[in-house]
Image (cartoon, rainbow, N blue to C red):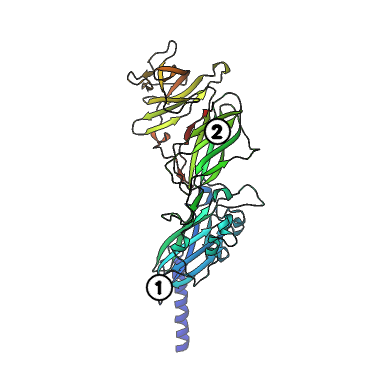
Amino acid sequence: MKKIRYCYYLALALVLGCLVACSDSGEELVPDTPTDGFCTLSIQIGASNNVETRAGDDDNALAHEFMHELCVFVVSDGVIEKKLVTTDGTATPADYALETGDAYEWRSNEFTLPSGEKTIYAFANWSTVAEGREDGAWKEIIDKEEGEALSDANLNFVIDDPASQIQLEEEDDMKFIPMSVKQTLNLAVSQTARIELIRLVGRVNVTVTNNKVSNLAVTSFSMKSFADKVPLMGGGFIGTGESITYSGEYNTESDWALLVGGNSDKSFHFYINETESDQPFNIALVADEKNYSATTTTTNIPRNNILPLNLKISESDLDLVVTVYINSIGSYPVNVITSNNLTSAATYNVTVPEGASFQVTGTVAGMTEGDGACVLSYYGAADGTNIQIDETDPSWAHVASLSGLTGDNITPLTVSYQVNGAERASCRLNVTTEPLKDLDEYIQTTGLYLRSWCAAPRWYEPINLMIEQ
């Protein structure tokens, strides 16, 4: 009888235990406390800003910009305690995504390690670069096994021109973006470590804006003064060995072409090495058999960042930039386009909000920006009803705060580009006014056009192209 009662209570305890377990499902799990000095660890890893984020949430990421191959080391006191490779876990959305570089997240299986301070080194897509193939310095790191030594000193070397070795267009011979990261961890309780890989390169997004009425054929593009090498690791690693120079250059292929319709734009992109410099980048472009050149305002392109550029080509040799200033918002560039009337090639149109001030600046083919200044005046019978030109600095004007403005409120201005008081070029600028929109519809710029791969889009850096004489 006692035995039966004992079995009854045991069964009851098991049932109650199951009920408690079921009631707790869905609640956040409390990390286990270490048992006999050991903890359970798993690793969740992805490209920067994509840990716990679906790939569709990253508007800036392109296909194949994620993980293809992965190697993770967990190091304690300079010795590798655990080595993980791609086959030691599962990828998201599925393992086959690794084949095409589209695995944006990878999770390891659980494993047990002694508790304490750990350093995690993670690497992806090393086979793209020479140092990651065969007997290169990076490949020597990847080939290390558990029990071997690994520290920062082993990783302080440079990778030769990784950007030029990336190839994501050829399906049969893809070369994916190399990535690396170092992260420290205090393994005091069982947990999941979340690691974000950092791409060794940056990306330049180029938009060619054709402000002409006719089509534009761009047949060549180059951009130079990039770093020719990058340190394997970011965040303070300088990369010993060969010194880094700024001789890197991107050139389109000989058969490359970009056809841009009138008053429209088209875009392309390319990868560049992380560059920290105090010199701008030089741009050369051939469009409609004319040679154009320009320099950027940006001098630095950190790894894992995108630099958007807008190259504008106009009908006239006088290229205008109109910058609008709104109180509490700051400044932002507005689009300046040519008239659709082929007989008025030197006529430009721009729309600015009421109550705002704006400044007109420009460049003339064959001259450097800043050589001259724009002087505004009223065209024909126009007056200062809607647009008031500043008397002290006539490159500035103010839009009156008017009610009920429509697109028909056009004030034509004459823009005279002058150097030392002498006019070098002139054009007509039709200014259309509109009611002030909600403040969040205007984008503030502070001169920082760079953004990380997953950051919200910002204004492109406008580049004024000049015809080379």
Is 77 or 246 nearer to us in this picture?
246
- Outermost residue to the left: 392
For mark 1, give the secondary structure. Answer: loop
Checking the image for residue 303, the label placed there is none
Where residue 135 sits: x, y (%)? 58, 62
Which amino acid type is shown beneath numbered disc 2?
A: Val
- Outermost residue to the front: 242
Nearer the observer, disc 2 or disc 1?
A: 2
Q: Residue at x 39, y 13 (%)?
A: 383
In primary-sequence order, the first of circles 2 and 1 is 1
- Outermost residue to the right: 172
Residue 285 visible at all: yes
Where residue 282 sits: x, y (%)? 50, 37
Q: Quarter of the image for the C terminus: give it.
A: top right
For mark 2, give the secondary structure. Answer: strand
* 450 is higher (above) or lower (below) than 336: below
* 357 is higher (above) or lower (below) than 303: above
Pointer 1 local density, CA inside 10 Å: few below 14, some 14–19, many at least 20 = some
Is 263 or 275 nearer to us in this picture?
275
Q: CA distance from mark 2 to mark 1?
A: 59 Å
Q: In the rendered image, which quarter is residue 264 located in?
A: top right
- On the image, numbered disc 2 is attached to which residue? 208
Where residue 16 sits: x, y (%)? 44, 73
- On the image, numbered disc 1 is attached to which residue? 34
* 33 is higher (above) or lower (below) than 296: below
